[in-house]
Image: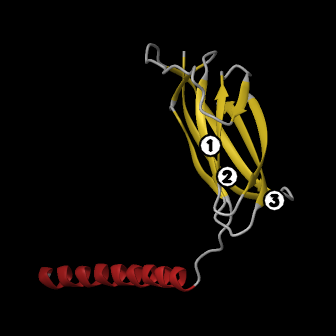
Amino acid sequence: MARLATQLDRLRRFSLDSARLAVDIGRVLRFAVAPPADVPGIAVLAGDERARRGRRAAYRVRVHNPTDTTVALALEVRGGIDDEPPVFALRAELVLEPDGVAERWLVCTWAGAAELLPAPPADVEPVWLADGPVARWRVDATLADGAGRPLHRLEIGGQLLG
């Protein structure tokens, strides 16, 4: 009797796995037949997960245009600490050629000062782990088209050290 119960359990698991496999194969075939439309997006939003209030921190933002036309885009970058209102909000207007890439560097102090630079900053020092975290920071990047419609959004976060 125990052997029969074991076999029925195996059959039930096989049925569930087979159903999941069929659904996943359908998704792959749908993507192969009709891939999603190419739209500009944020390719990279990255930076050190540790920051210290009052010291410069740098975050890299890369935007890619995979379409065959030149597009005008608006990149908006906001940063905040925990659930407080945003510490900064910056905006950059970008014009990307077909299959073009634009890179901006966000440099901020987490004390209100922030700017978007076209090249990586040279004066940002690494943060050493001397103190424990006192808060959490977040950077949110939103990309919109020329009419202001949002196209893509990425958010990263990390620790603000004391």
Estimate how packed mark 3 is, as few (under 14), some (14 to 19) or many (20 or more) residues with alpha carbons within 10 Å: few
Q: Nearer the viewer, mark 2 or mark 1?
A: 1
Q: Are marks 3 and 1 in contact (CB under 8 Å)?
A: no
Q: Is residue 85 visible?
A: no
Residue matched to label 3: 149
Towards the viewer: 25 or 116: 116
Residue matched to label 1: 61
**Residue furthest to the front:** 97
Residue 92 sits in which quadrant?
top right
* 19 versus 155 height, above or below: below
Q: Give SS at disc 1.
A: strand
Q: Earlier in the sequence, mark 2 or mark 1?
A: 1
Towards the viewer: 66 or 55: 66
Q: Which colouring convention does the figure follow?
A: secondary structure
Residue matched to label 2: 153
Q: Nearer the viewer, mark 3 or mark 1?
A: 1
Left or right, 88 with respect to 133, comes to: right
Residue 137 sits in which quadrant?
top right
